[in-house]
């Protein structure tokens, strides 16, 4: 009997070991033939290539490791922007699909069917090569609200110039900690005495008052810098000052959020539909107000259905942001697996680092998700 | 006649409210319509802001006036129920109606009225609309890539034949229905491979396959006389033995001679492209990823620890990385892992990479179905004395797969939508061909037309697939 259990396992193991052995043996032979040695030492070498758009200081004299960081940060930037917009659009469209208004429901349905049935890469290309190319040149751009300039060279927005930014950040962190404490206190009070505390208004108050105080007492000071047009040569113009969002970033974020929002909308719809009507009626019959029904009965149950697939979509969005390579947005894949690989020729090391990075990102999120799922799961008696 | 109270319309003066409301509403729509289709602004004598918002205000009041519950007029009730339940809904409905009226003229003029259909060069497109002549000129390339024009009938014929063979299931009589699964899982993929390899690619007809078929036929005939107890082992061992004997012992010399026969002109895979490549890649990945995913999902739920953890590791690895890095791996890293003299075709590498990637997703979907089955099904099957494979084939999988049809369909849809990514390794399917055509100096500036065209093509394919999966789901839905 035991033999029947051990044999298949042994066979599988042997096959896997053989395949890996075959691959690594060949890799060794190939690298010896080409005179390459395996190692990650190249990461500290000077990279000597430039990156168009970077959140941290970077130029050719920095190391490959810093180039990796630049790519990683750009990936995270576009993912975060995409996630925020996808969530907003997705929730709005998801609720619109449940509307009793026929026109609204149809519009939302058409949006969902249309955007999710077209490949993401095609959408990115569309925004980048077709839609954003139709924008005006910098010198012909009409300002929006007087300060935003949407041009073919990118989106120019006013930027804040901060004094003592760190104090402001600390005040925001302090406000968040205070809110956490208020919530714990409110929950205890509710459990012990059955009295509800208006947590939301207190939280908003904290979020407004503490940063405001930092302006008056902490010497924080912010001025707005408005982009101003500047002539580079006879025919070439650009804007100086403010913040420049390159068209690659805009089209990527636009395509990612419009595409992922369709899936999030479906998750939201399924979640709200998943709460049975009896729950709402029961809650109303014990005298809860409509707001309380939504907050205390419907939302917690709907969120339990919504959150797991939505996180999956966030993960997909992060992984899909690697399509940036197609339109030359300097993300992890383009900077590291593209340019750095071309220069060093270290295929195995670089591809493995890139894959490990994404793997770490997604495994971290899925471990967190599993923990969260266990926490909110219905505890059956 | 009762007193009219315009703030709260009621049933008493139904027709007074109805006529005034409908006339206001129609007036607002007429204003927007004239403005958008004939650029005629009837209210230009008013200040700009007021004339801009006037249709909205008029329509809002109109809808307010006809918002009468249980009026007894069927049409009015339907309108009220669907677009006019309260003030907020009325406003949103108006905005949507106006947006549609506003958007129609520019879209119509771009797509049809100002568009150019005739001509075969850039000069034909002078209007402000779309240049469909561009699509017409490049249509062949978008469909077949760089495949030689004279040989394109091979692709057409193969696709027609494969579609016909794929549709056999619809015509099968009751007697043959039970063999359909075998046909679709084993025989059809082999036929498809033969078509693609010998016909579209034009590879040499090496006689391995004919020997294989002879071996299979002989072993099936002998198989009728073998006691059923040994049949399993028999079919594992004998066909391969006969095949090896035929190939290496009896007909070795002839094989080398015959293997050089080549019926069609060889077209290397680098020249394949366009929509046909999209179909070929998604078709093969679809065929390969399903069985691999099935075995992975069974492995993940297995009691045997080594198999279980290898499956988990495999699945989580592929699910954790983006497809583009997988394709990078297959193009730059994988050749390092092979012996120097061994070369695997680019297209084959891509198909393997995408299949393994999607197999991990299929595995997770199927696992969901397996987990959803109640334990009683397993216990019942075991109590009937079924072994592991019998239990899964006859009891568990038919129910589990039925449950996961929507999930699998979604994975396949994702697969079709992922095929454009093969541009990473230099294969140009339809999106890649568009980008190539866009940089052609004689046809600069028609990116929009190309992308719109490809979007419509993909939308039709994917939408049809999702509707079909919905139908399947309804068809196999059983009460539980």
Image (spheres, coloured by chain):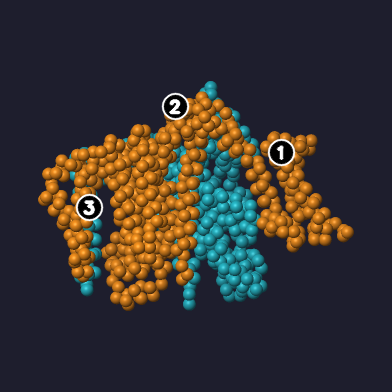
Q: Is residue B318 in view from this perspective? A: no
Q: Which mark is residue B213?
A: 3
- The disc, 2 or 3, on the residue closer to the chain's N-terminal end is 3
Locate the N terminus of chain B by quadrant.
bottom right
The answer for how far apart the CA atoms under marks 1 and 3 are is 72 Å
Q: Which residue is mark 1?
A: B34
Look at chain B in the picture and name its colour. orange
Q: Nearer the viewer, residue B256 or A32?
A: B256
Chain of the residue on which disc 1 is drawn: B
Chain of the residue on which disc 2 is drawn: B
Tell me if residue B417 comes above or below residue A311 in the rendering.
above
Q: Quadrant of residue B140?
A: top left
Q: Residue at x 53, y 48 (%)?
A: A114
Q: Residue at x 20, y 60 (%)?
A: B221
Residue A189: give x, y in percent of width and height.
59, 71
Q: Nearer the viewer, mark 2 or mark 3?
A: 3
Q: Which residue is mark 2?
A: B441
Classify mark 1: helix, strand or loop. Answer: helix
For label 1, the crowd category at 10 Å Cα-Cα, with few meaning under 14, some 14 to 19 and many 20 or more, is some
Look at chain A in the picture and name its colour. cyan
């Amino acid at each position: 009997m035991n033999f029947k259990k051990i044999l298949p396992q042994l066979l599988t193991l042997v096959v896997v070991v053989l395949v890996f052995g075959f691959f690594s043996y060949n890799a060794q032979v190939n690298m010896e033939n080409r005179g390459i040695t395996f190692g990650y030492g190249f990461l500290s070498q000077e990279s000597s290539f430039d990156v168009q758009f970077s959140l941290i200081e970077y130029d050719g004299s920095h190391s490959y490791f810093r180039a990796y960081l630049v790519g990683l940060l750009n990936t995270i930037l576009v993912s975060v922007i995409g996630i925020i917009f996808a969530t907003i659009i997705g929730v709005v469209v998801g609720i619109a699909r449940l509307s009793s208004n026929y026109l609204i429901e149809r519009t939302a349905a058409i949006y969902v069917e249309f955007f999710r049935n077209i490949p993401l890469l095609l959408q990115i290309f569309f925004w980048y090569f077709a839609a954003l190319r139709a924008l005006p040149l910098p010198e012909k751009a009409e300002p929006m609200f007087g300060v935003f300039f949407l041009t073919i060279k990118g989106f120019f927005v006013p930027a804040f110039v901060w004094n003592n930014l760190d104090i402001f950040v600390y005040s925001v962190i302090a406000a968040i900690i205070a809110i956490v404490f208020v919530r714990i206190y409110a929950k205890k009070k509710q459990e012990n005495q059955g009295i509800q505390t208006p947590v939301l208004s207190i939280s908003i108050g904290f979020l407004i008052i503490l940063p405001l105080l930092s302006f008056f007492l902490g010497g924080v000071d912010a001025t707005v810098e408005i982009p101003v047009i500047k002539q580079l040569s006879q025919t070439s113009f650009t804007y100086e000052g403010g913040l420049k969002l390159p068209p690659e970033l805009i089209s990527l974020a636009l395509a990612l959020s419009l595409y992922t929002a369709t899936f999030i909308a479906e998750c939201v719809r399924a979640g709200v539909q998943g709460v049975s009507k009896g729950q709402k009626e029961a809650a109303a019959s014990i005298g809860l107000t409509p707001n309380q029904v939504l907050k205390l009965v419907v939302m917690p149950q709907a969120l339990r259905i919504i959150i797991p697939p939505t996180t999956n979509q966030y993960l997909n969005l992060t992984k899909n942001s690697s399509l940036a390579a197609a339109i030359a947005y300097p993300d992890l894949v383009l900077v590291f697996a593209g340019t750095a690989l071309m220069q060093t020729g270290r295929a195995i090391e670089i591809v493995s680092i890139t894959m490990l990075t994404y793997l770490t990102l997604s495994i971290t999120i899925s471990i967190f998700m599993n923990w969260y799922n266990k926490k909110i799961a219905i505890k059956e008696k | 006649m009762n007193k009219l109270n315009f703030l709260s319309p009621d049933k008493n003066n139904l027709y007074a409210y109805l006529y005034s409301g409908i006339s206001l509403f129609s007036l607002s729509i007429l204003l927007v319509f004239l403005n958008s289709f004939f650029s005629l602004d009837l209210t230009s004598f008013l200040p700009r802001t007021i004339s801009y918002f006037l249709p909205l205000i008029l329509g809002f009041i109109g809808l307010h006036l006809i918002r009468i519950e249980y009026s007894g007029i069927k049409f009015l009730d339907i309108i009220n129920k669907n677009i006019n339940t309260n003030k907020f809904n009325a406003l949103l409905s108006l905005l949507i109606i106006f947006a549609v009226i506003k958007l129609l003229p520019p879209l119509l003029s771009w797509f049809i009225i100002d568009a150019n259909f005739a001509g075969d060069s850039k000069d034909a497109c002078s209007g402000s609309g779309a240049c469909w002549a561009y699509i017409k000129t490049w249509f062949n390339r978008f469909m077949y890539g760089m495949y030689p024009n004279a040989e394109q009938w091979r692709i057409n014929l193969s696709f027609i034949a494969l579609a016909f063979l794929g549709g056999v299931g619809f015509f099968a009589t009751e007697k043959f229905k039970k063999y359909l699964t075998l046909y679709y899982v084993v025989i059809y993929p082999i036929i498809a491979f033969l078509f693609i390899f010998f016909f579209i690619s034009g590879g040499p007809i090496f006689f391995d396959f004919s020997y294989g078929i002879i071996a299979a036929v002989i072993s099936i005939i002998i198989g009728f006389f073998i006691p059923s107890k040994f049949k399993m082992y028999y079919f594992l061992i004998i066909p391969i033995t006969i095949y090896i004997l035929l190939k290496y012992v009896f007909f070795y010399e002839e094989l080398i001679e015959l293997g050089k026969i080549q019926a069609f002109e060889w077209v290397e895979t680098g020249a394949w492209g366009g929509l046909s490549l999209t179909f070929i890649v998604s078709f093969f990945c679809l065929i390969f990823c399903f069985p691999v995913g099935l075995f992975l999902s069974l492995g993940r739920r297995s009691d045997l620890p080594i198999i279980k953890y290898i499956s988990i590791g495999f699945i989580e690895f592929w699910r954790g990385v983006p497809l583009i890095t997988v394709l990078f791996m297959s193009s730059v890293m994988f050749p390092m892992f092979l012996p120097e003299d061994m070369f695997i075709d680019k297209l084959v590498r891509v198909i393997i990479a995408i299949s393994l990637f999607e197999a991990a997703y299929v595995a997770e979907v199927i696992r969901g179905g397996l987990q959803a089955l109640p334990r009683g099904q397993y216990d019942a099957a075991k109590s009937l004395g079924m072994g592991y494979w019998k239990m899964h084939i006859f009891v568990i999988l038919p129910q589990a797969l039925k449950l996961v049809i929507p999930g699998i369909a979604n994975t396949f849809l994702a697969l079709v939508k992922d095929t454009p990514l093969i541009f990473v390794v230099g294969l140009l399917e339809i999106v890649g061909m568009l980008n190539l055509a866009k940089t052609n100096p004689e046809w600069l500036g028609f990116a929009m037309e190309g992308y719109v065209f490809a979007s419509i093509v993909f939308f039709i394919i994917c939408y049809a697939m999702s509707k079909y999966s919905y139908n399947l789901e309804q068809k196999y839905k059983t009460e539980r």
